[in-house]
Amino acid sequence: MDTQSVKYKNFFYPPGGILLWMIIFVEILSFGLALVAFSHYSGLEPEVFRQSRQSLHAGMATINTLILLSSGYFMAVAVNHFKNQLFKKARANLLFAAGGGLVFVVVKSIEYAGKLEAGLTLSGNMFFTFYWLLTGFHLIHVITGLVILLAIGHKLRHQPASVDAEDVEAGGAFWHMCDLIWLMLFPVLYLF
Amino acid sequence: MKKPLIPVLAALMLLSAATTLAATFVGQPKQAAWILLLLALMKIMLVALCFMKLRQAHPFWKTALFFMLVVIGAAILLAD
């Protein structure tokens, strides 16, 4: 067992840092409770929710799921390469991860444009209030994650030796958190 | 020794395909919701354990995440 594995076994040092994991737990709980409320309202107005859900594009959401999962893979590989001091490979994989995030934002924007054109706005009904708030808040997380990845990538290009492994790992954990939240939202909003 | 991540990505893709199939072919809404949430739980745990390396962390973090997801999933099913 290497020293890093021993460090991770310590309660106070989960991979990515204890502070980030506390944030991840709070985020999952917040989105989870919102989904419970969504499910509750779905029981009160089943027909409205069923018809509204049919107007969503599940295919686009499935593509976005695959994109985010692939992006998460590249991020995990980037962290591994960084720890092995393979900075160029780490940066290349980081950029692939960021590219995936960018595609996610583009697909989401196309989906949003379609909804706005059809007049399905935040105030349309309870389903679309939840839809816009939950997916919009998630999109803000993805954009924040993208900024973090691009900042790390920029530093990796110009001063790779000065980049802290814990920063790369924390950036990666934040990026994966976007996957986790999307994996919760996707079935409940689009498929139930 | 580091475990390769490609099989994890492949498993995630397969679980995503299974999600689409379950949403399309399982007729009973309640049954479909159960299956979809179970598949989501598997995907989330795979990402957390393998991509985020939670596998190497203190058992508290793995257990807490799993139980929190189970409670949220159960609450979603019961709230409907």
Image (cartoon, rainbow, N blue to C red):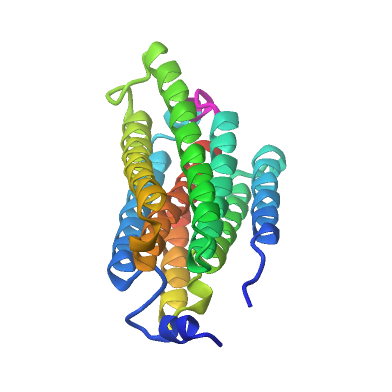
**Residue B43 appears in the picture as rendered:** yes
Q: Residue A58: image x %, image y %?
A: 57, 32
- Residue at 49% over, 82% down: A5
Task: Give above or below for A144 relative to B2.
Answer: above
Task: Give above or below for A104 relative to A11.
Answer: above
Horizontal side of A185 relative to B14 (left or right) equals left
- As for residue A53 lying within the magenta part, the answer is yes
- Residue at 32% over, 56% down: A27
- As for residue B44 lying within the magenta part, the answer is no
Q: Of residues A33 and A106, which is closer to you in this image?
A: A106
Horizontal side of A172 relative to A100 (left or right) equals left
Task: Give above or below for B28 relative to A107.
Answer: below
- Residue at 33% over, 46% down: A151
- Residue at 54% over, 34% down: A61
Q: Residue B80: image x %, image y %?
A: 44, 48
Location of the N terminus of chain B by quadrant is: bottom right
Q: Of residues A41 and A166, which is closer to you in this image?
A: A166
Query: Which quadrant would residue A22 be assigned to in this image?
Result: bottom left
**Residue A192 appears in the picture as rendered:** no
Query: Which quadrant would residue A170 be assigned to in this image?
Result: bottom left
Q: Residue A77: image x %, image y %?
A: 56, 58
Q: Residue B10: image x %, image y %?
A: 70, 54
Q: How many marks?
A: 0
Task: Give above or below for B32 relative to B43.
Answer: above
Q: Which residues are magenta?
A: A51-57
